[in-house]
Amino acid sequence: MALGMISWDREQADERKNLSVLSGFLASATQAFFDDLGHGLDPLGQLLQQIDVVNHPEAARSALEKFQKRYPQVGAMAVIDTSGRMLINTALPPGAPLPDYRHTTDYMAPFQAALDDPGLYTIGRPEYGQVIGEWRFPFRYTMRDEQGQALFMIQAAIPLGTGMHFLRNLSLPSNSLVGILREDGFQQARWPVDNPDKVYGRPLNGPLIKTIHAQPGLRDGYFTGFSPWMYTEQQRLGAYSHLATLPMYAYVSIPYSHIWNKWWEHNSPVLGIFLVFVAIFGTISYWVRIHERQHSDELLSQARRDSLTGLTNRAGAEELLEHQIRAAKESGRPFSIMFFDLDRFKDINDTLGHGIGDQLLAEVGKRTAATLRHHDMLARLGGDEFLIILPDCPPAAAARTAQRLIVVFEAPFQVAQHRLKMSCSIGLAFFPDHGTDRETLLKHADTAMYEAKRLGRSGFACFEAGLGERLQQRLTLEAKMRDALVKQQFRLHYQPIVDLESGRILCAEALLRWRDDDGVEHSPVQFIPVAEESGLILPLGEWVLKTACAQAKAWLDQGFDLSMAVNLSTRQFQDPDLLGKVTSVIGGCHLPPSRLELEITEGAAMLDAESSIEVLGALKRIGVRIAIDDFGTGYSSLSYLKRLPADTIKIDKNFVDGVVDESEDQAIVRSIIALAHALDKDTIAEGIETEEQKQALEKAGCHMGQGYLFSRPLPAEEFQALLLADANGSRWTNAYVN
């Protein structure tokens, strides 16, 4: 009898421990889900502010629908002004009448509370959505001006049937209950649900909320009892964990009948024999066995655990992959693997130090783990390389997981005092299509990852025949580039930046070109990414800076009044000795600092915004001008943009292409120009190709531009002829377009 009770207590203790782990995981996954959604709404709100959504709500539909595609858990997106009037709802077509709840107290009270809440986002109680026709809860983000006054609210409707999908992914016995409970007693989400009106329509008074109210200071614990509101009257055992920053608890519960069944399975076959020998051997063998098992498990765990991130290490990952291959061969069920690393991680180590890099890797591990299913396996192979094993996952599902991971990386990582904007490149390989052994699968996933980098980073690629050859071509190109740098095969072409009204040349932008020994002209689109990835961009960029500054000084000495614009790559911008190199170059060729304009992309500036402000400020203090290139293609924070010491904002060609039409591109261009004027910055439009585009830009208030309407990039000799024609007042543009 005593041994039976000991075994029963052990079964209960094991289940409590399992439930506690599951509720803790569920709390972390829920917090990560909400935080990811909130951080995603932040840049969306800034974009909608630029579009002036309050006065032009339909102009925001495309941006709202793109956001909804990025977050498939969202059932509908709406924008509401500060009075509570709905401006647009993606669940309704353009022109359809919008519901008006401004005279409904149950709607306006939580709406007003959300407007007044200073947090990043608020989460409302579940309610039946009249527009989408199902139970959902509102996820609200309030856009504010610089004084903190509310401008409008973005509301995402999260359907309770499909939005909280991870509630259904926990591996639990039948009749288990999983959910999120608000501190006010209302269910935020639960699975399974047989009667949503009964579960979500009123506060509950079951054993969990009684336990929480009895011990309000506890952030996690256990509960037992009967719950009349559940679909079963069985006595239950459960565990709960408080979310990190939200007034909610994640909980998991199982019926006691499940514990009894496990106890009987474990004890009935040997109960008779055990009773015979228990007095002599039972207690001793039990404790010896437990001690040895704990010691062995501890040693095995340490040997297969990455000390930095707490994830499985390379040795453990290889064992897990071998096990998964054997299981897949026996069952005939396919699986997928994902191999990914961090784009430009070396820049973080080189500029901020390995300590920050290590902390970033730990944060990457946490964020990645929160996006996976409970039975997916995540490992760090070394450096910034990670492996994910996705059991029972066909290619289409693996691609969705990869896309979800890319979206999760869009929110900056907070590491010490740095907000780091990172991205990852992912390679996918599938068993058995791409290999039936560990080495082949890993090699093919690694090859696919390099293809994702070739395609522009922050993306994924699936392995296919021919990628190995493409990787070899990339390595060959890198070797040719190293040889070309020694042989001085690189050269600069110059494209004029002109005054749109007078046509006068104001500046020359230096653009890199390369023709190899065989006379092959290589596109910068092909060789610049390889230079970035291999590190060749640093010596190559330094050569560009020296050559362009020397040429600018030569033209100034000949009496031509113009400046020189030079592009800085992300790797150059992260170079800790950038200021010293720029100072040395302009001093060596005696170029006035004000005649040099350094262009950095919006994405490079936002990689670590605080550091960017410091570096650009130092360059400004020596007199160099700063331009933000490709503006509008990223989600930079307006608060950071205001602090960036830039002189010029360059409008990306993608927006200039549509500036003539009454389109979203035209609205964005006008917003960028208005923003630049408000911040006392110049604007330059890139890629102007038609007279109509030029006129539309002038009408919008842009006074400088470049593009094939004026001239293609030219060698120095031909560009000098252009300068002579400009100085003599000739109409020069038509002669240099083709």
Image (cartoon, rainbow, N blue to C red):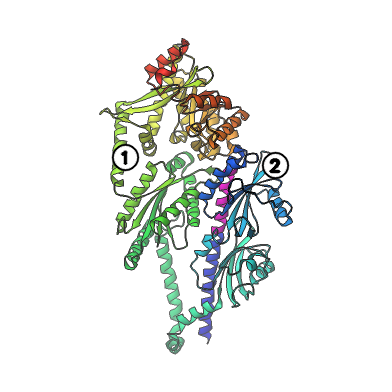
Q: Is residue 344 left or right of residue 90?
A: left
Between residue 444 and residue 505, name the one nearer to us: 505
- For the stretch drawn in magenta, the main secondary structure is helix
Q: Is residue 604 left or right of residue 536?
A: right
Residue identified by numbered label 2: 149
Count neighbours of disc 2 (C-alpha within 10 A) and say few if under 14, some if 14 to 19, many if 20 or more: few
* Relative to 29, residue 39 above or below: above
Which residues, given as a range, are shown in magenta?
28-45
Between residue 617 and residue 507, name the one nearer to us: 507
**Relative image position of residue 659 (x, y in whole percent):** 52, 31
Residue identified by numbered label 1: 474
Label 1, secondary structure: give it: helix
Label 2, secondary structure: give it: loop
- Taking the spot 41% from the left edge, 68% from the top edge, the residue there is 296
CB atoms at circles 1 and 2 under 8 Å apart?
Answer: no
* Relative to 652, residue 451 above or below: below
**Relative image position of residue 466 (x, y in whole percent):** 29, 46
Q: Quadrant of the C terminus?
A: top left
Question: How far, Cα to Cα, is label 1 from label 2?
Answer: 52 Å
In this view of the protein, can residue 283 be seen by the observer? no
- Taking the spot 63% from the left edge, 76% from the top edge, the residue there is 226
In this view of the protein, can residue 36 be seen by the observer? yes
Please tell me in which quadrant of the rendered image residue 572 appears: top left
**Residue type at mark 1?**
Arg
- Taking the spot 44% from the left edge, 63% from the top edge, the residue there is 375
Q: How many numbered marks, from 0 up?
A: 2
